[in-house]
Amino acid sequence: YRVLKDNGSLYISCTQHNIGEILCTAKQFGFKVNNILTWYKPNAMPNITKRTFTHSTEYVCWFVKGKHWKFNYDELKALNMNKTKEGKPKQMRDFIELPIVQGKERLKNAIGRAAHPTQKPERLLEIIIKASSNENDIVLDPFMGSGTTGVVAKKFNRKWIGIEINEDYIKLAKGRIGE
């Protein structure tokens, strides 16, 4: 909260396991929750235990600081794949249907398995980054993982800072984004 600009946004990806704590903690720090995006994964991993409903959603909590946050409504409307009956752009909803990362977007390790367990789709980060930043703004990802935020920020002319503690993931992100 201290370092975020007064018109800044904070996005936190989570599951039903920790969304309550995230919402409460952010509120204690002074953030306002603007939306909770639901990422529906039509190709979710199968339910091996057969003891619960299959987990096919993740959530992205959008918090803001101050009253004059950025929200690029028209740019998101243009990004929305859903159209009106007349074929015109439709408002971006808080329900985003995207498959989990697979195919050539999925980063693989030396033995051909997923290199990072929670790699996010570039399209999801495109929506988030374009929603709350403009060209040349700074995007910070304090849990950089496989580098998706940096890849997308760079692609759309945002400056970015990535922080990651895991050396394997740092190498992975550097390989994707460039040194």
Image (tube, rainbow, N blue to C red):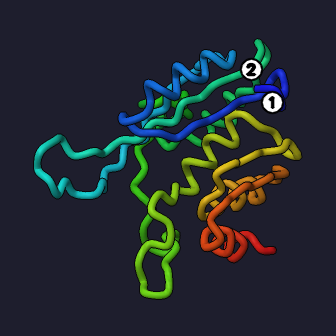
Query: Residue lying furthest bottom in this view?
Result: 111
In which quadrant will I find the C terminus?
bottom right
In the rendered structure, the answer to whether residue 4 lies left or right of residue 14 reads: right
Where is residue 66? Give x, y as percent: 77, 15
Examine the rendered structure and indicate whether residue 21 appears above or below residue 170.
above
Q: Which residue is mark 1?
A: 4
Q: Total label count?
A: 2
- Residue 76: image tag: none
What is the x, y in percent for residue 104?
A: 50, 75
Instruction: Give the crowd class for mark 2: few <14, some 14-19, many >=20 residues within 10 Å.
Output: many
Q: CA distance from mark 1 to mark 2?
A: 7 Å
Q: Nearer the viewer, residue 4 or 34?
A: 4
Q: Secondary structure at mark 1?
A: loop
What residue is drawn where x is 84% and y is 51%? 159
Q: Residue at x 84, y 27 (%)?
A: 5
Residue at 49% over, 32% down: 37
Instruction: Say if 162 sits above or below 103 in the image.
Output: above
Q: Are marks 1 and 2 in contact (CB under 8 Å)?
A: yes
The amino acid pointed to by label 2 is: Lys
- Residue 24 versus residue 114: which sits nearer the camera? 24
Identity, as a three-letter code, of the amino acid under mark 1: Leu
Where residue 13 appears, x then y in whole percent? 52, 40
Q: Which residue is mark 2?
A: 65
CA neighbours of label 1 inside 10 A, class few (<14), some (14 to 19), many (20+): few
Give the residue drawn at x 59%, y 28%.
Answer: 62
Quadrant of residue 10 within the rendered picture: top right
For marks 1 and 2, the one nearer the N-term is 1
Is 139 positioned to the left or the right of 35 in the image?
right
